[in-house]
Image (cartoon, rainbow, N blue to C red):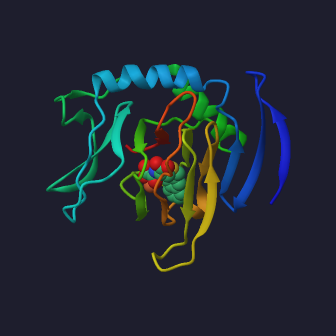
Amino acid sequence: MNYDLFDNDNSGEYWTEGICDGAVVLRQFATNTAPELISVINLITQQSPFRHMKTTGGYTMSAALSGCGSLGWISDHAGYRYSAIDPTTGLSWPEMPAVLFELAQKAAAEAGYDNFTPDACLINRYKVGAKMSLHQDKDEQDFSAPIVSVSLGLPATFLFGGKQRSDKTIKVPLTHGDVVVWGGEVRKNFHGILPIKADSHLLLGEERINITFRVAG
Ligand code: MD3
Ligand code: FE
């Protein structure tokens, strides 16, 4: 692991940890902007409310989903895909606020991806006990672009696996303000989130929110 101290232009300190080729954690990169992120998420979810999607196997996901940007991720009888229309409202997803877009673009640039231009921003809400089982993200069109993820609120244990479900996993703790850039070699690796432990966070209470930015279309 390599640790380096930096300062972003919001005068917040952050440090980087390389997980492996293609995956880097920017610890505390989003801490300073977190209050602003939370307020825009509140506006987004007034327009496109959190909902529990069904898996193709018929299970209801314990994490609730919303999103913004020109594309959002949906799941129904026909399977998983990106859609320009939010099926819950019948309308477009809310526009991606500049504070979200700019945070994602800056984080990607830190990891060596210039001009990252996400068209989908998925917002996952985990209450205590919610989890995300091991899966791959492969509904996007462009796998050369990285995924940028931002963790807010309660801490989580991220499970990071390999190309096959049965590959060994490592655990990566993610706390409020951490940003991870996943690209290249690991873009299609299996990953998941262990059940969120009971606790309370000063800004978000008994919740964890994860924001992921993708080039989906
Ligand atoms: C590694 N979300 O929305 S974000 C998802 O914390 C998802 O809500 C988790 O997995 C969460 O699909 C994890 C980190 C993440 C996202 C995508 C990845 C890690 C990834 C794709 C490939 C490898
Ligand atoms: Fe995922």
* Residue 60 in which image quadrant: bottom left
Q: Position of residue 118 (x, y in %)?
A: 48, 37
Left or right of 53? Residue 1 is right
Q: Nearer the viewer, residue 127 or 164?
A: 127
- Residue at left offset 48%, top offset 42%: 212
Q: Residue at x 45, y 43 (%)?
A: 215
The part of the image, by quadrant, that contains residue 110 is: top right
Residue 41 horizontal/vertical position (percent): 43, 26
- How many tags in the picture? 0
Residue 88 in the image: x percent, y percent?
19, 34
Against 141, residue 32 (above or below) is above
Q: Is residue 27 above or below residue 12?
A: below
- Measuring 40% from the left and 40% from the top, which residue is drawn there? 125
Quadrant that contains the C terminus: top left
Can residue 96 be seen in this snapshot? Answer: no
Between 96 and 116, the one nearer to me in the picture: 96
Ligand 2's quadrant is bottom left
Q: Report the front residue among 86 and 204.
A: 204
> What is the x, y in percent for residue 214?
47, 43
Q: In the visual, does 50 lie left or right of 169?
A: left
Residue placed furthest toward the bottom: 166
Left or right placement of residue 106 versus residue 1 in this view: left
- Tell me if residue 156 can be seen: yes
